[in-house]
Image: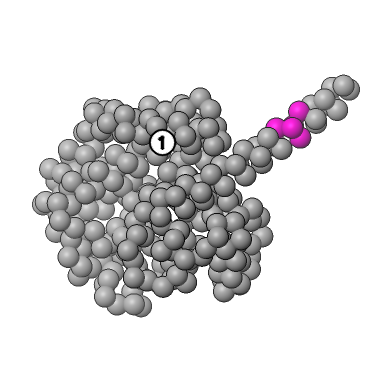
């Protein structure tokens, strides 16, 4: 799909512009004929799909389904997606429950092929999620950090009211690559942190959250003010890093040109 959304400014200022224009931008995307064809096709066809195998055989259905959960990069991994969708949600040892990235679990729960009750109004639910993700994708074509920020806000808002322990939710953050990237950026973590033992990583994330955000409790972290604080930290550090890289590049050019 096309239609890059260019904000014209990056960093914290860009995030503020996105927040102000989001409702209007999403309405425009929802009215986009290309998007409408995808969501309408899904709504018309999904009622006749009773098995995961039938879903993965239909490229258009599968693409919309995966995109709605931020898993569009798996479009070629049909066998894997079918196994995920067919996994027994109630079995803690099943494939979908063993995956650290819980986006797969949410997708499997929504479709209900593995024993769960399918989401009510599945077509509407997936269609709305698809539009939201398409908005984020188009923003990301212009500024990937803004896409990551929008994703983080949505993922954290979805955790509101969850009765899971803080450690469980932190493990979900660590296992969700785009969400993890925002936390790592906000905390100033380098790529080396991913090489640590997973329990040590958990300690580092929770300690950094206490240090930079004042709490490591998801009852606090999912509040709108705290989510915005996290994103502002992420955007600020990203802006500093981008400026540093650009300055190094400019310096190198100057040296190479004999300036």
Give the main secondary structure of the magenta stretch: helix
Query: Can residue 63 be seen from the camera position used here?
Result: no
Q: How many marks?
A: 1
Name above or below for residue 81 compared with residue 242.
below
Q: Nearer the viewer, residue 72 or 13?
A: 13
Query: Which residue lies at the image location 34% right of the left edge and 30% below the top edge?
Result: 25
Q: Is residue 207 left or right of residue 229?
A: right
- The span shown in magenta is 246-250
Q: Is residue 14 shown left or right of residue 250?
A: left
Above-or-below relation of 210 to 240: below
Left or right: residue 112 compared with residue 214: left
Residue at 21 percent of width and 39 percent of height: 39
Residue tagged by mark 1? 19
Q: Quadrant of residue 81?
A: bottom left
Crowding at dot 1, Cα within 10 Å, few <14 / some 14-19 / many 20+, comes out as few
From the viewer's side, name the closer residue of 91 and 219.
219
Instruction: Check disc 1 and report its element: helix, strand or loop.
Output: helix
Q: Is residue 213 magenta?
A: no
Q: Quadrant of the C terminus?
A: top right
Q: Quadrant of residue 200?
A: bottom right
Q: Residue at x 43, y 63 (%)?
A: 218
Q: Quadrant of the N terminus?
A: top left
Q: Is residue 134 above or below residue 234?
A: above
| Residue 8 x/y as whole percent | 51, 25
* Residue 87 visible, this orientation: yes
Q: Residue furthest right?
A: 258
Q: Position of residue 153 (x, y in %)?
A: 42, 49
Residue 237 horizontal side relative to residue 70, left or right: right
- Residue 128 % position (x, y): 25, 43
For this rendering, which residue is in front, 258 or 59? 258
Q: Report x, y in % for residue 41.
A: 18, 39
């Amino acid at each position: 799909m096309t239609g890059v959304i260019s904000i014209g400014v990056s960093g914290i200022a860009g995030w503020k512009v996105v927040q102000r224009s989001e409702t209007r931008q999403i309405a425009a995307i929802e009215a986009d004929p290309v998007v409408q064809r995808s969501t309408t096709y899904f709504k018309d066809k999904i009622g006749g799909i009773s098995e995961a195998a039938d879903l993965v055989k239909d490229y258009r259905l599968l693409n919309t389904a995966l995109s709605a959960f931020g898993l569009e990069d798996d479009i070629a991994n049909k066998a894997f997606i079918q196994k995920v969708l067919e996994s027994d949600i109630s079995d803690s040892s099943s494939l979908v429950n063993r995956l650290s990235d819980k986006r797969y679990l949410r997708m499997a729960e929504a479709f209900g092929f593995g024993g769960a009750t399918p989401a009510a109004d599945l077509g509407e639910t997936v269609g709305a999620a698809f539009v939201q993700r398409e908005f984020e994708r188009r923003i990301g074509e212009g500024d990937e950090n803004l896409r990551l920020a929008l994703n983080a806000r949505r993922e954290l808002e979805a955790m509101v009211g969850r009765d899971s322990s803080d450690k469980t939710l932190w493990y979900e953050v660590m296992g969700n690559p785009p969400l993890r990237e925002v936390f790592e950026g906000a905390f100033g973590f380098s790529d080396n942190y991913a090489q640590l033992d997973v329990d040590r990583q958990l300690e580092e994330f929770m300690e950094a959250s206490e240090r930079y955000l004042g709490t490591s409790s998801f009852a606090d972290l999912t509040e709108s003010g705290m989510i915005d604080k996290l994103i502002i930290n992420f955007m600020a550090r990203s802006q500093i890093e981008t400026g540093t890289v650009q300055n190094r590049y400019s310096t190198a050019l100057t040296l190479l040109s004999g300036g």
